[in-house]
Image: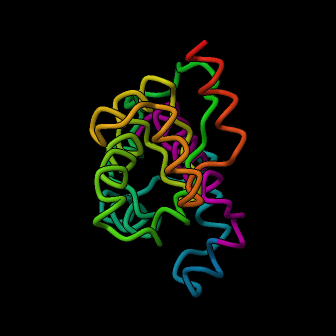
Amino acid sequence: MSSEYAKQLGAKLRAIRTQQGLSLHGVEEKSQGRWKAVVVGSYERGDRAVTVQRLAELADFYGVPVQELLPGTTPGGAAEPPPKLVLDLERLAHVPAEKAGPLQRYAATIQSQRGDYNGKVLSIRQDDLRTLAVIYDQSPSVLTEQLISWGVLDADARRAVAHEEA
């Protein structure tokens, strides 16, 4: 493995770890010692080669597809403008599936496209909200109110939607 490739791979590993709010020692604790902080750190710096087997195991530990860790794969949302709407994924998980199923599937698709696996929040764009409104057969403002009532969107989302509709 070239040192440049190893550094790029390490940068991907570090990005996933930090997205999940984990320190190197946090990885060691969460894995109950399976992943030593010094080893993961050396992978991230590109100082140590990681085998395909270990990379697959690390991807499984982080809960991401292996291809998200490989250099040369850029998540689809990397060049997006700053979003205005933020979904609370933790609260979304508690909304009954018969209500939130379409939103949960849509959010999972966005996460996969962006390589965004923090699992806590997900930023969406106005276009995403309009698409979801079509899926739910509601206007964007009515859907926004529904998502706020579920606790999935912050009440500040009203301003973003009102600005867009003006």
Magenta region: 1-26
Residue 100 location (% of width, % of height): 36, 59
15 drawn magenta:
yes
Residue 152 location (% of width, % of height): 56, 55
Going by the picture, which residue comes out furthest to the bottom?
32
Going by the picture, which residue comes out furthest to the top?
166
158 drawn magenta:
no
The residue positioned 60% from the left and 49% from the top of the image is: 153
Residue 150 location (% of width, % of height): 53, 60
Main secondary-structure element of the magenta-colored stretch: helix
Residue 79 location (% of width, % of height): 53, 19
The residue closer to the viewer here, 46 or 132, is 132
In the rendered structure, the answer to whether residue 31 lies left or right of residue 155 reads left
Compared with 86, 119 (above or below) is below
Compared with 49, 92 (above or below) is below
In the picture, the quarter occupied by the N terminus is: top left
The residue closer to the viewer here, 140 or 104, is 140
- In the rendered image, which quarter is residue 33 located in? bottom right
The residue closer to the viewer here, 143 or 115, is 143
